[in-house]
Image (cartoon, rainbow, N blue to C red):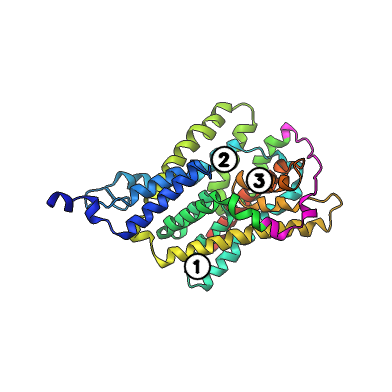
Amino acid sequence: MQFLSNTGYAMADYRHLIMICVGLIFIYLGIAKDYEPLLLVPIGFGILMGNIPVFKGLGLSIYEDTSVLHYLYQGVTKGIYPPLIFLGIGAMTDFSTMLARPILMLLGAAAQVGIFATFLGALALGFEPNEAASIGIIGGADGPTAIFLTAKLAPHLIGPIAIAAYSYMALVPVIQPPIMRLFTTRKERLIKMDEPRVVSKREKIIFPIIGLLLCCFLAPAALPLLGMLFLGNLLKESGVTERLAKTARNAVIDTVTIVLGLTVGASTQADIFLTPQSIRIFILGALSFGVATSSGLLFAKFINIFLKNKINPLIGAAGVSAVPDSARVVQVVGQAEDPTNFLLMHAMAPNISGVIGSAIGAGILWSFIR
């Protein structure tokens, strides 16, 4: 009997079982449905680890100072992992689609309305300004940015905000298509866009330097994220640092993704995570994502009023930062109407600019709220 009382079976309650079920759902979605498996599988497994009941004081819980998981979690709470992920994203990203038609960057900016609308909504629900800012950034559908800002402003909310942000990123193929069809007509979804111009090698090399200076002078607090993003892209495009670019887009980002996902998942201990506050965060996150998607779509329809060569408003939905899933969803929805309509390369422009826009939005919120 004493043996049984010392096991996790005896210490578990219904809250642990609920969170273990959530972890299993994440793993299922990642493996069976292929929804962001690189994120959902380590996060789901981390949720399982974090919700195995353990004795306090043995250095096993992620919230105990002597725990190995606690040391790894410092990369989250200190904001170390997100810039490293941005380095890898930069080394994987081709900005040429955005440079070929700069007006499409406005769609990425328009989608950031979701961030500030949710910020105001969270304030109205009684959240403190620092908490509201962290919740609002979920609307950018950018997990690393959400974690980075929350670590700076509301570290006690990292668990629910990170889980909400990555959940909605993974569910892009489920959430976005109904919104896209609601706000566009079939005629609009059938619009075919002109081939983008060819972007020169010189433009690709100059852009990360100019982008860094323009964006970070505008929002200096975004420097840790955008600085690493543009550095990674310069390593890729320069042609002389391919070994560094390869390391950034493979070994670095893969290692950090594993550790970040595992520790974020493990931080969702039932006694800390299952609160009314977490439920409100998930609801606000869903609304934020919906507002961001619809804002990009509606703004695309608006600028079409002034354009001779119309753009397909579906690509406005890719203004959220879920790269490249949102762009792929645009392609799928567009081809459901016309299999010969290829929108992926066009959708990548607002998708990439959305990454930059969400980081700038986070920097602006951080600079004001601090």
Q: Residue at x 74, y 58 (%)?
A: 184
For the residue pair 207 and 140, the one nearer the viewer reads as 140
Q: Nearer the viewer, mark 3 or mark 1?
A: 3
Q: SS for tag 3?
A: helix
- Relative to 186, say whether 369 is above or below: below
Q: Secondary structure at mark 1?
A: helix
Where residue 125 appears, as percent x and y from the top left, is 50, 72
What's the amino acid at mark 2?
Answer: Ile
Residue identified by numbered label 2: 89
- The residue singled out by tag 3 in the image is 327
Q: Nearer the viewer, residue 30 or 98?
A: 30
Label 2 to label 3: alpha-carbon separation: 15 Å
Residue beneath the point at 49% across and 56% down? 164
Q: Which numbered disc flags the more N-terminal residue, 2 or 3?
A: 2
**Compared to 88, does 16 lie above or below?**
below
Q: Residue at x 51, y 61 (%)?
A: 135
